[in-house]
Amino acid sequence: MENVVSTSVFYDLKNQIFDRNKWNSKVFSVYGYEAGAGKSRSAQQYLAETEDRALYVQRFSKDGELDATAKRINSLAGKEIAVAFTGEDTKKKRARKRAIEARTLCITHKMYSNICRGDHQDLIADRRILVIDEYPDLLEQISVTNKEIGQLWTEIFQYGFTETDDLASLLRDMANKYSNDSEVLKNKEMVFVNFQSEIYDKYKEVIEQLLKKVGLSKRNEQKELLFKFQQILNNGAYYYEGGFHTFDSTPKFAMLDCNIILDANWFDYRYSLSTKFNVIKQPKIFDYSQAEFYHYDLNTSKKALKNYINLTEKALERIDLKDSSGVLFVTEQGQKEQVEKGIEAYFNDTLEGMQETLGIPIVTDYFGNLIGKNNYRKFNTVIVQKTPNFDYGTYALTNFFYKYHENLPIATISIFQDEDIEKVRLSTIAGEIYQAIRRIARDNLTNAKIHVFNSNQEVIDTVLEQMPGIQYHKCKIEVSKVGKEAGAKEQGKEKKPSLTDKRVEEVKSILTNIKQSGKSDITKKEVRTQIGIKSSGNFTKLLDDLLPFLQVNQITNKGQKFIFKS
């Protein structure tokens, strides 16, 4: 039997599970233990000990993670009481029977979301305790753009309801109005459109009838199309970026007699948007006084990163890896390959070769693939080179989702101006960064080196609050950018080298080779002949661009020659 050492740290959590007087079927108790404190394993131990039937929800099943959780609970119990159940098991009668009978059922967030939609209710029947590891996100965005409006005309007209044509015309007119409204554009507004007036009831009724008719014919594409319009009309929608955007209001939090969420990101503002969450802060247990946090004040949004040429190389110039036990670079999935190329260019070696040369692993990973990961627990250096932003609409729809379910008013907003949405955005970013940096030094924070590239001090302050006493250093860093200076047209776009650029590089190559050969000089005519320029005037135009190269390499431009200093 596996043994997990119980400490007084988790007394509140244990008491919540075993003391039925503390149970609440209408509220989640959110326990904000630190990342790496062992809250998941402790909860699994308590589920192994209780006789109550339970549902345990974790984010992923990949790489056997869900099976490992069930095995751990069984090891703690000393017998088989837990079963892992995934989407692949839903059509297997034997697997479903085992899942239903299991005292503790382990599922993923995705399966829980399906249960919240009303599916798989047999899996939660007669269960009393629900434990969810990490924030359960039920938001599913729904969008109606000109494409869907056009399909309402072309796909649904066959059913003979003129109301659908009228609805399509109405939405097209609204879209044209908001897309060309100077105030909306000037203020960067997300316009809230409310369809609660009685004039829209006829459209809602027709869509409801059509959904029933299409449902009988099993035309799933038409059903999905009509469902989008139903959600827009029932919920309301924000109009922005050429479409009406809302959410699927079908999912409702599935709750049992005792409902617990384990989340180191207890400061996530989403928990403040609903009365269903009661956050229970927990004391800090780690000593951060010997760890160091280096904050590089640099914009690392997706747009900004496209403009940087050598961020990874510049970062490595500044960061001392001498006492490192392992280095984790964190970026976004789309930048992973570029970061790896930057690392290899700096060390002039492959990642595998560097591990042999330096004696330490250097690894890249990305946001969305880190929470709950323990692969880097023995590393002591993390370098976060990306601000983990979601699309702004996601933050706005999250706020909309909770306001809708709490029956609170919703209004038109300007991007980055709404207080609640900004709190959702910034706390979510801070939470992603905090989770990323706590992937390292899981057992011992002494000598941990944390390097974060981010330009939002409020985000950094929130992260620092989770690690009291850490040594904080604010740093400046200069990186090279693509294209012209800020404010110029086409800033940040990758541009192909011009003919002039190519010729300048060709001249540099020729001069470098001649200098290395030991010659003292070369005539300009010889050089321009080699690169195919007949006019001496056209060649002269290259000299300004060549000046920095000539100075660095001690090459003198004199008369009709380039003279090499020995």
Image: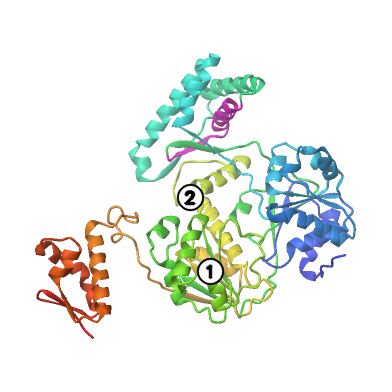
Distance CA(mark 1)–CA(mark 2):
44 Å
> What is the quadrant of residue 427 in the picture?
bottom right
Is 110 within the magenta? no
- Residue at (71% x, 45% y) in the render: 112
- Residue on which the image places disc 2: 418
- Comparing 321 with 393, the one in front is 321
- Residue on which the image places disc 1: 351
Q: Taking 497 as reference, is 355 above or below it?
A: below
- Residue at (66% x, 20% y) in the render: 216
Q: Main secondary structure of the magenta part?
A: helix
Location of the C terminus by quadrant is bottom left
Label 2 sits on what residue type?
A: Asp
Label 1 sits on what residue type?
A: Leu
Location of the N terminus by quadrant is bottom right
- Residue at (41% x, 73% y) in the render: 476
Q: Give coordinates of residue 96: x percent, y percent.
A: 81, 41
Q: Give coordinates of residue 556: x percent, y percent.
A: 17, 79
